[in-house]
Amino acid sequence: MKRFWLFMPLVVAVVLGAVLFAGIGKDPTKLDSALVGKPVPAFNLKDLNNPENSLNESLFQGEVTLLNVWGTWCPSCRDEHADLMWLAREKKVAIIGLNYKDSRDDALVWLDRLGDPYRKVIYDPKGTLGFDMGVYGAPETFVIDASGVVRYRHVGVVNGEVWEQILLPVINDAREKG
């Protein structure tokens, strides 16, 4: 029995090493999503700007759209905000916001100060839609085709490089497939 305990640190070290080695070289922005290829989950949540209005998955019908998950508590969301403004204004990209686990008042002040790149903002204070979408945190951005099907999930900040190298090709492909 004493021998078993002598080898226990070695066993733990080997197992831990195998787990860590498996993660080396993997891109943390490429988290698989079970939703890719499936429709946006059904939801019924309030419009951040007009709480008397409810929003649902029909928001994603008719054109390729980005769904951007953000919160005022998220420093990286602030980092990407100017790029989202640029995409909405200059590139005419349809962006729907998902205000995730946030305060309505804080979110409204944020958009008033920094600008509002979103066509609509889904208010998700409890994270229910975020949970159904498999969101780990913010920011995350999904490409959703004109039929409401999730085509891609990007974890992390959207900037010019991410736009050109990742999102634009996915959007163009989704537009071609109609």
Image (tube, grey):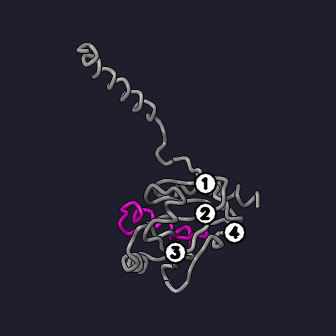
Q: Earlier in the sequence, mark 2 or mark 3?
A: 2
Q: Earlier in the sequence, mark 4 or mark 3?
A: 4
Residue at 71% x, 71% y: name it.
62
Query: Which kind of residue does numbered mark 1 sit on?
Result: Leu
- How many angstroms separate mark 1 from mark 3 (CA)? 21 Å
Residue at 48% x, 74% y: name it.
123
- How many angstroms separate mark 2 from mark 1 (CA)? 9 Å
Q: Which quadrant of the figure has residue 78?
A: bottom left
**Residue identifier under label 2:** 41
**Residue identifier under label 4:** 63
Quarter holding the C terminus? bottom right
Query: Which kind of residue does numbered mark 2 sit on?
Result: Pro
**Cβ atoms under marks 1 and 4 closer than 8 Å:** no
Q: Position of residue 47 (x, y in %)?
A: 52, 79
Q: Earlier in the sequence, mark 1 or mark 3?
A: 1
**Residue identifier under label 1:** 35
Magenta residue span: 71-97
Quarter holding the N terminus? top left
- How many angstroms separate mark 1 from mark 4 (CA)? 18 Å
**Cβ atoms under marks 2 and 1 closer than 8 Å:** yes
Which secondary structure lies at badge 4? Answer: loop
Q: Earlier in the sequence, mark 2 or mark 1?
A: 1
| Mark 4 surroundings: few (<14), some (14-19) or many (≥20) residues within 10 A | some
Query: Which kind of residue does numbered mark 4 sit on?
Result: Glu
**Residue identifier under label 3:** 121
